[in-house]
Image (tube, rainbow, N blue to C red):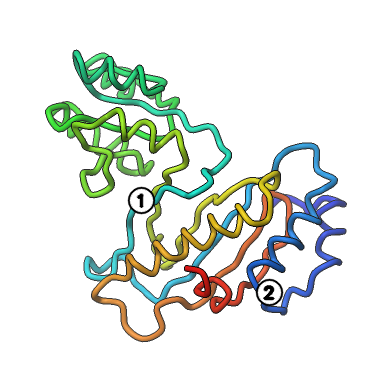
Amino acid sequence: MAQATKKMKAALTTVDRNKIYTLEDAVKVLKDASKARNFDETFEIAINLNVDPRHADQAVRGMISLPNGTGSTVRVAVFARDDKAKAAKAAGADIVGAEDLAEKIKAGEMDFDRCIATPDMMVIVGQLGKVLGPKGLMPNPKLGTVTPNVEKAVKDAKGGAIEFRAEKAGIVHAGVGKASFDDKKLAENIRAFYAAIIKAKPSGAKGTYVKKVSLTSTMGPGLKIDTASLSAAA
């Protein structure tokens, strides 16, 4: 495990690790702690859910376009031909192809963060399940990444659409903005993400759905968040 830096240790002295912060207070504390950094830190949320994703009726997965984007550069690969391929390129896709793209992926060339495909390309993409699946890159119609409207899908991906999925321990996490965002925009993104998780509550979830929420920045401390402050505007 990496050792805490001097700046990290200094940041830890400014917070109460046992305190439960409102969203606005947590954003302010983390932004204050990141002021001395020489790069734009990512704000990350982690939501511990009372679900067991191993059961199909407790799986939590979906896609959301954050109102203010993520602030991160997203490289998009698109499986498409002819006019659809041209539309994808025009929309800003970084890599566009068909069999040639599949061969590159099989060879280990996966310099992209999101993979989109037109429905007719799934015959090719389906052969890449063992490669793309474990990395969370397999196109999925339920997430809007298998679609005839590749132009919209590419623009959504570039504009801040993020995929979420509960891990084995029932935790969902995602980057929800940058330290350079103003407090209001960060809060709007976080509340939008939380609302999407609430909306995605599976039928098999029993008891208290959300167990704990925490917010952190790349080099900052993790802060516990009062879920009431998230629901207020969600």
* Amino acid carrying mark 1 in the image: Met
Q: Residue at left 20%, top 15%?
A: 83
Picture coordinates of residue 10, whole percent (x, y): 87, 58
Picture quadrant of residue 14: bottom right
Picture quadrant of residue 4: bottom right
Q: Residue at left 39%, top 69%?
A: 198
Under tag 2, what secondary structure?
strand
The answer to whether 74 is drawn above or below residue 68 in the figure is above
Picture coordinates of residue 53, whole percent (x, y): 32, 66
Picture coordinates of residue 74, whole percent (x, y): 48, 33
Q: Which residue is mark 1?
A: 63
* Amino acid carrying mark 2 in the image: Tyr
The answer to whether 82 is drawn above or below residue 62 in the figure is above
Q: Which mark is residue 97?
A: none
Residues under labels 1 and 2: Cα distance? 27 Å
Picture coordinates of residue 224, whole percent (x, y): 64, 72
Which residue reaches farthest bottom? 207
The answer to whether 207 is drawn above or below residue 78 in the figure is below
Q: Is residue 52 left or right of residue 177?
A: left
Q: Is residue 194 left or right of residue 147?
A: right
Under tag 1, what secondary structure?
strand
Q: In the depicted view, which residue is nearer to us: 188 or 44?
A: 188
Q: In the depicted view, which residue is nearer to us: 230 or 135?
A: 230
Q: Dot 1, how many residues are within 10 Å of its Cα: few (below 14), some (14-19), or many (20+)?
A: some
Q: Is residue 211 left or right of residue 123?
A: right
Q: Which residue is mark 2?
A: 21
Q: Residue at left 65%, top 59%?
A: 216
Q: Dot 2, how many residues are within 10 Å of its Cα: few (below 14), some (14-19), or many (20+)?
A: many
Q: Is residue 133 left or right of residue 112?
A: left
